[in-house]
Amino acid sequence: DDYSAGLGCFGWVLVILSGLLMLLTFPISIFMCVKIVQEYERAVIFRLGRITDKKAKGPGIFFVLPCTDSFVKVDMRTVSFDIPPQEILTKDSVTVSVDGVVYFRVSSPISSVANVSDADCSTRLLAQTTLRNVLGTKNLAELLSDREGISHSMQASLDEATDSWGIKVERVEIKDVKLPQQLQRAMAAEAEAAREARAKVIAAEGEMNASRALKEASLVIAESPSALQLRYLQTLNTVAAEKNSTIVFPLPIDMMSLFLNRK
């Protein structure tokens, strides 16, 4: 009804004349009136500047009237593009360079033609500003560790903004985060210091455990003097197994104690 009222009387006269012209020039006019769109395309038809139907035509064959009808083809396939590297100041005042990639497709051909002049270019520009706005609210630690959450946040923001354009944002990914050289060196030094601190703690814990084990072993050996002699023999066997010129003669401590008692 809105379409019929929008054409008006003069519009309908032009449409009728266009139909008569098509009949008079048949079958030559068939080459001008029959159009074909591919499986991945849709056609939005304008008749005297107004969209003829609430649904786009295609895929396959459709008809247009000469002189009064025009149409715009819309590609329905998923399109990907790279977001150029953006210099971003994070929440903790660190300047980083971030780039990404966006995947989107046209969900409503009529909206993508009627509501925005260039849906593809508009989506690209909006993706750049959205990347800067979202990352400007994040700390450097969040930016490096929570890329998946940032990608989902960007996708939701872009999808909401482009919904009126007939665009569906399917996926957003952060590709690379480039840090300044000075910051990279500072982070590397911090990580190295943290590793050294953990190594010292582990070594100290090992020494403590070893001292406890030695204490327990000394208590066991003190209960049995013959165990100390066996330990002497084991140590001698270990030393003799190595290729060296050192000769070790075990001397029982009991014998030394006899000489000490005589003095």
Image (cartoon, rainbow, N blue to C red):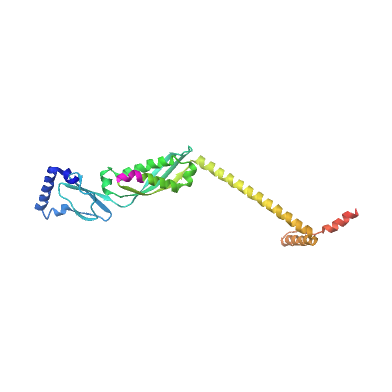
Give the residue furthest to the right: 262
Q: Inspect this view and state whether residue 199 appears.
A: yes
Q: Residue at x 26, y 47 (%)?
A: 110
Q: Inspect this view and state whether residue 246 appears.
A: no
Numbered range of the magenta stretch: 159-165
Viewer-proximal residue among 7 and 86: 7
Q: Residue at x 65, y 50 (%)?
A: 203
163 part of magenta stretch: yes
Viewer-proximal residue among 30 and 112: 112
Left or right: 42 with respect to 138? left
Kindly report the secondary structure that dominates the magenta region of the rendered protein. helix
Left or right: 41 with respect to 32? right
Percent coordinates x, y for residue 107 in the rendering:
30, 50
Q: Residue at x 32, y 47 (%)?
A: 167
Determine which quarter of the picture holds residue 254. Answer: bottom right
Percent coordinates x, y for residue 23 in the rendering:
10, 53
Determine which quarter of the picture holds residue 131. Answer: top left
Percent coordinates x, y for residue 165 in the rendering:
30, 45
Percent coordinates x, y for residue 25 in the rendering:
10, 52
63 part of magenta stretch: no
Give the residue furthest to the top: 93
